[in-house]
Each structure stands twice: as C-alpha cells, then as structure tokens.
Image: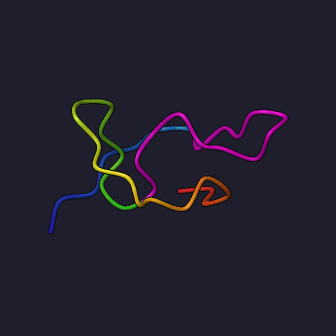
C-alpha cells in the first residue's frame, strides 16, 4: 500500500476536501447520506 502525504483539512461544515481513504482529489464516490463527512 502506498500512502500519499497530504493535509486532511476539514471545512466548517465538517467535510473533507481529499478522500480520507486514498488522499485523492480525482473522482470520488460518496454515499447517499448528506451528513456523511467522508
């Protein structure tokens, strides 16, 4: 497994800019829960 070094910054709404699993900013598949922070 190769981990990318990045800053996992969270916005005021608690959502993350990067994928918290792979640190990618490419196409991210999210769940249907609007309150999900991932």
* Magenta span: 8-20
x and y percent of residue 8 in the render?
Answer: 58, 44
| Horizontal side of residue 15 vs 6, given as left or right | right
Q: Residue at x 66, y 44 (%)?
A: 15
Compared with residue 35, is residue 29 higher up or lower down, i.e. above or below? above
Can you name the residue that lies furthest to the left here?
A: 1
Instruction: Find residue 2 and report its image quarter.
Output: bottom left
Task: Kindly indicate the quadrant of the structure image that contains residue 10.
Answer: top right
Residue 33's x, y, as percent?
55, 62
Q: Is residue 29 left or right of residue 11?
A: left
Query: Camera-side residue: 12 or 3?
Result: 12
Picture colour scheme: rainbow
Q: Nearer the viewer, residue 37 or 4?
A: 37
Residue ID at (63%, 56%): 37
Considering depth in this image, is 13 or 24 the residue closer to the camera?
13
Q: Is residue 13 above or below residue 37?
A: above
Quadrant, the N terminus = bottom left
Position in image of residue 35 (x %, y %): 68, 57
Q: Residue furthest right?
A: 12
Whether residue 7 sits left or right of residue 35 in the image: it is: left
Q: Residue at x 30, y 54 (%)?
A: 22
Q: Establish if 34 lies above or below 13.
A: below
Q: How many marks?
A: 0
Query: Where residue 19 sits in the image (x, y, percent)?
Result: 40, 48
Queried whether the magenta region covers residue 16, the answer comes back as yes
Main SS of the magenta segment? loop
- Is residue 13 a member of the stretch shown in magenta? yes
- Which residue is painted at 41% across and 60% down in the image? 31
In the picture as drawn, the residue positioned furthest to the bottom comes out as 1
């Amino acid at each position: 497994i190769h981990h990318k070094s990045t800053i996992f910054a969270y916005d005021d709404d608690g959502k993350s800019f990067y994928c918290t699993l792979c640190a990618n900013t490419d196409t991210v598949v999210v769940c249907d829960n609007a309150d999900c922070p991932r």
